[in-house]
Amino acid sequence: MRRIREFFSVKITKAPALVVLLAILIANLVFISIAAIVIMRLAPPSLENNDYWSCVYYAATMLATGYMEIVEVSETGVLLILFCMFTVLIGMIVFTGAVIGYVTEFIASFIEDADTGQRKLLISDHIVILNWNSRASEIINELLYKNDREKIVILVDDNKEDVLNDIDERIADTIDDENEATKADSQQLKYLAGKRHYRQNKLKNKLTIIVREGETWSTKQLSDISIEYAKTVIILGNDIAEVNNSFEYDDALEQKEKGNTNTIRTLLQVTYLTAEENPENNQLVVVEVENDWTLTLVEIIISQKRNQGSCRVVPVATNQILGQIFSLFAIMPELNIVYGTLFSNKGAGIYVESSDEYTLTEEEFITEYLSNHQKTLPLTVIHDEDGKYYRYYMSENEQSISTATDVDDTSVRLSVNPDYQINDKHVIILGHNSKSIAIMEGFKAFCDEWQTVDSPNLLDITVIDSAENLAKHDEYSRYKFVKNVITADVYDKQLIYSAIESFIDSYQNSGCIIVLSDDTVGDEDIDADVLTYLVFIQEIFDNKQVLNKDFDISSIDLVVEIINPKNYDIISNYCANNIVISNRYISKMILQVGEKEAIYNFFDDVLNYDQPSEDVFVSKEIYVKKVGEYLDLIPDSCTASELIRAIYQASPADNKAITMGYFNTKGEMYLFTGDQSSIEVTLTEDDKLILFSNH
């Protein structure tokens, strides 16, 4: 008896649903058997089929349907009628009720399992996102601009509903905004007919998004989302903004600055499950890293995997990339618009072709391509450590790369200033974030390439920040270009006000104010300091315009970082002429790298200046150069095709420049994509060229 009790106890614990189902079946079989015997005893003589199995049929019918067929027989006794009614009643409770209850519970359990990710998801050729942070919704949002339908599976530790709400809100806002723009365009169809930027179709949500809860490093959870059949796996870092307890927040911040062990654990599991020896498993794994410790370990893992075979893991160093971008924007603020376009799936973008054979030098490749193509710009060639040869282009779409056309010889007369030098730059930085050191390193790289004996003070920077953060970075004393440090926070209005006012008075037309958003604060404080600083700056500008009607706000560049895109509309009402949504840049880069890993090599080269020890400029960058300073002879009106080829031919042999487009004096950008021969260009000395070159 004890063994029987133990047997049932184990079964109930391991498979309670199965035990309940068996109990229902056994109870009904027993009752049907007993009912059949009673009916057979009480059946009237006029009943033709009164054998046991016929009575089993009568009993089962009454249990299942409530139909008392036997009552219709003549001479049916009262006792049999009462028993049949009793049988029907029991059937409603024991059979119908129990079965309905069991099926209902089974369906609910099935839905719950599917909802929480307990069942395997049979899917392939999808994008997997592991973890969720403030940049994740921008990745989803960017996929809206792709022509193809996409399947995205997101695995998060918890807060699934919050993730779904975040996605729905972000996508809805984008679709509404884009469709409003489409509506405005359609109202001017007669003016915009034939224009290459005209949007003919409304933006639609073509994304299939599945969010599951589970451990991102769990073999079962990863297998259940068919990670081995995904085309791209994106591993994101953690956010600490949602931590409300101050003690937990300090611990989380300290841990985040040291390194992210969760990223390492997840990467190890992912690279194991997407082993290269399986032919269907050749996924590209993109890893977001936010500190040196995590980056070092990721690079070790990549090296180990390469020793075992090919390895398609690309680390995206978030803070380093954003630091480089911000330093570029301080020097050439217009690059915010250029990179915002090139990083996006919307409009012009960077495309790449690869081959295993090296046939042409970069100059030979570009010269030959320009001779018979006018819809795409050739940019550069890069060779990776695996021996592959990559050609990079700027184009509206991938199809245009192979579209050859006849190109007329250019007769445009112009000359390039061989001694072009970037003018001295003056920057004031308000606040800090986790990228502050990376921003300074970006400035240092710029100085190493561009600072000369004739321009020893090429860059000078003033930093206004809290005492705590300045002490943390030793007041940036290791950077010679940091000329002034002012200890103040947002509550020291008069000190900040005085410093900014003095800066504006000293550096009109050559100064840039950068306002950084602290990404280490809680959700409720995100971008709050930025808004406060903007109130100060706006007041200063307003006062200056009252005193001097000729004061031009645009004479001082103002680059403002925000983290939450929801604050864009608020900030755009202030005086900022360049708003940088930092999370959006990383999201766009992660997505582009996830589609074409060779894109990372391009952006890694473009965002880095040459090392100071290099005698020859190797790294290419995107520059915005004033026409009157870059060209000794400004050409007459011409087509974009003619201008591109004339500048390439006229630029020095060691610094060949590809003209990607230009900014007019109103700050409007025109990129040379589409049919270059149909784009008319009339430059003035105050316009600015967008150039891709070594220096």
Image (cartoon, rainbow, N blue to C red):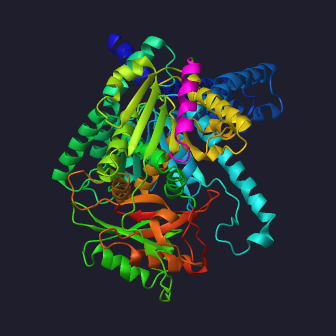
Q: How many marks?
A: 0
Instruction: Tell which of 312 and 182 is nearer to you.
Output: 182
**Residue 335 can be seen in this image:** yes
Instruction: Tell which of 198 and 22 is nearer to you.
Output: 198
Q: Which residues are magenta?
A: 492-510
Q: Quadrant of the N terminus?
A: top left
Q: Is residue 136 left or right of residue 50?
A: left
Q: Pinpoint residue 427: horizontal percent, then vertical percent.
A: 46, 39
Q: Is residue 280 left or right of residue 387?
A: right
Q: Quadrant of the C terminus?
A: bottom left
Q: Is residue 403 left or right of residue 542?
A: left
For image coordinates 39% across by 23% down, the residue present is 470
**Residue 117 can be seen in this image:** no
Q: Pinpoint residue 116: horizontal percent, then vertical percent.
A: 51, 33
Q: Is residue 384 above or below residue 429?
A: below
Q: Pinpoint residue 323: horizontal percent, then vertical percent.
A: 40, 41
Q: Is residue 166 above or below residue 180?
A: above
Q: Pinpoint residue 328: horizontal percent, then vertical percent.
A: 43, 48
Q: Predominant secondary structure in magenta? A: helix
For image coordinates 61% across by 79% down, the residue present is 678
Q: Is 186 included in the stretch rendered in magenta?
A: no
Q: Looking at this rendering, what residue extends furthest in the left direction?
A: 307
Q: Is residue 427 above or below residue 382?
A: above
